[in-house]
Structure formats: structure tokens, C-alpha cells
Image: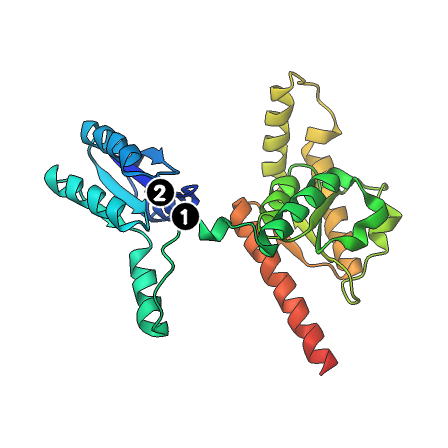
Amino acid sequence: MTKFHVHLVSDSTGETVHGIARACISQFEGVEAEEHQWPLMRTVAQLEKVIDQIKEKPGVVMYTLVNDEMRQTLHAACRRYRIPCISILDPVINFLINYLGVKSKGEPGRQHSLDAEYFSRIDAMHFALAHDDGQGLWNLNAADVILVGVSRTSKTPTCVYLANRGIKAGNVPFVPGLVPEELKALDNRVNGPLVVGLTKEPGSLVQLRRSRLRMISDDEETDYVDLDEVKKEVIACRRLCTDKGWPVLDVTRRSIEETAAAVVRLRELRDAKRRETKQ
């Protein structure tokens, strides 16, 4: 196993450099990165303290800094200590400058400004929390997306992830014989939320459920962790989705991000079909 230090320096929240670094490092097998995150670097004085830390644990430096003085300070220090350093945003920003013929603003955290999109994400987050696990059935029609699935199919974290993209998502647990009438009334063929079913391989569900029960010190053997009963649950949920014309995503080997991306794509495809129908 190859281990190394990676320093993630940002003048904003650090989400961008962190996400890109993780995505890139994950492509290398047998490699383990010890991450050091340094967000909200707004002054040279702050940065110089971080440089001392980088010197103590040299490795790779990845950064998102737009202030020229801070960039030069970091680059000079990395050259002095022979530490590789790369700007995550420069290639894309330079490409856009050349293409658009317009200079960039060079303002930290512009993507997090308090604009309409920001408040849309906040509203979506409130909606996800108020419509989690079958709550708020009275206004399900106000959602953009409704996720339906048996227990432990990652409905809640997927809704939260979608909310961070400004999509109002609620979730309703599937329990055989107890499907709410408000959910049954939803139809993907008409205006309203997109309903998506989430399913998972029964054996994997049983393992997750047993792990959940152990966390709450409950080892009782019930239908909740009986493989045959879980299989019946999954089949019944799939049957409901098929009867209602709701698309189904198998999340057995999907991350939360991948599931959310698939939901977004399904919504885009449905909206495109609706636009074609209107023309």
C-alpha cells in the first residue's frame, strides 16, 4: 500500500477541491491518501500558517485559490520545499477565458453566493426533511421527485443529496398492504412529481438490516431480517412500481451520488418527452 499526504487548500468551503481530489485518487489501486483540508483561506497570514503544516507533512498540494498574491505565495513555498502543487480550477478557467474572451471575476466562493439558486437548495432541503419516511403525505404533489422503496434502500440520503441540487424530493417507505392512498394517486404520465422505485438485492438488504438492528442493540429474529420475507417485500414493491408505470432503480451496487444522478436523468428524460408531446 502506497501512502501519501495530500493537502487541499481553498479560499472557500473546499468542496470543489475535495471532490475532485477524491475522484482522481480513487482511480489508483493500492494507494491511500491522508487528507489535510484547509478551507476558508482568505489572507496570506492564514496561508503561511498552512504552509508550515505542509512543510511538516510534505506530499501533494491541490488548491482552489483565486487571489494572485495567495497563489504566488503558495507556489513559491512549494517550489522552495520541492512539493508538487496544482491548481484544480486553472485548466477549466483558462479554457473558458480563451473561448469566451472574457476575464474571470476572481472572487472566492462565487458558487456559494446567496442567489435564487442558493435559496432553492435551502427550500429543497426543508422539503426533504419534512417529507422524509412518509411524512407530509398531504402535499406530495408539491415534490419534484418521490422515492419509494423497502427499508434500507438509501431513500433518505438520496433525497438529501437531491435537495442539495435544488430538487424537492420526498420518500415513502414501501410496506406490503400499507401503501398510502396519496402515493397510489400519483401518476408519472401527468404533471406532478416523478415517482421512482428503489430496490436492492434481498441478501444485501438482510445484511444491512441486521447491521442496523445491532446498532440499536436489537438482535431479535423477525420478518424484517428473514430472507424469504424480504424477497416477498422486494417483489411486491417492484410489482407496485410496474403497475403504476414508475421506473425502478436497483441500488445494490450504486453509491448515493450514482443513484441521485440516475434519478436526475430519469426526470430529464420525462420532461423532454413532455415537451415533445406539447409541440
Between the residue at mark 1 and the residue at mark 2, the CA separation in whole angstroms equals 9 Å
- The residue that label 2 is drawn on is 10
> Please, is residue 191 above or below residue 44 in the view?
below
Residue type marked 2: Ser
Of discs 1 and 2, which sits in the foreground?
2
Residue at screen point 83% across, 49% down:
139
Judging depth in this view, the residue of 176 and 57 nearest the camera is 57
At label 1, counting other C-alpha atoms closer than 10 Å, the crowd grade (few under 14, some 14-19, many 20 or more) is some
Which secondary structure, mark 2? strand
Residue at screen point 60% across, 40% down:
157
- The residue that label 1 is drawn on is 16
The image quadrant of residue 242 is bottom right
Position of 88 with respect to 249 (left or right) is left
Position of 176 with respect to 121 (left or right) is right
Residue located farthest toward the right when viewing the structure as drawn = 181
Is residue 222 visible in this depiction of the protein? yes
Figure quadrant of the N terminus:
top left
Rendering coords of residue 236 (x, y %) = 77, 47
Judging depth in this view, the residue of 183 and 279 nearest the camera is 279
Residue type marked 1: Thr
Position of 28 with respect to 177 (left or right) is left
> Please, is residue 144 above or below residue 8 in the view?
below
> Please, is residue 187 above or below residue 26 in the view?
below
Residue at screen point 44% across, 48% down:
109
Residue at screen point 43% across, 41% down:
13
Judging depth in this view, the residue of 101 and 220 nearest the camera is 101
Judging depth in this view, the residue of 167 and 100 nearest the camera is 100
User: Are discs 1 and 2 less than 8 Å apart at CB?
Assistant: yes
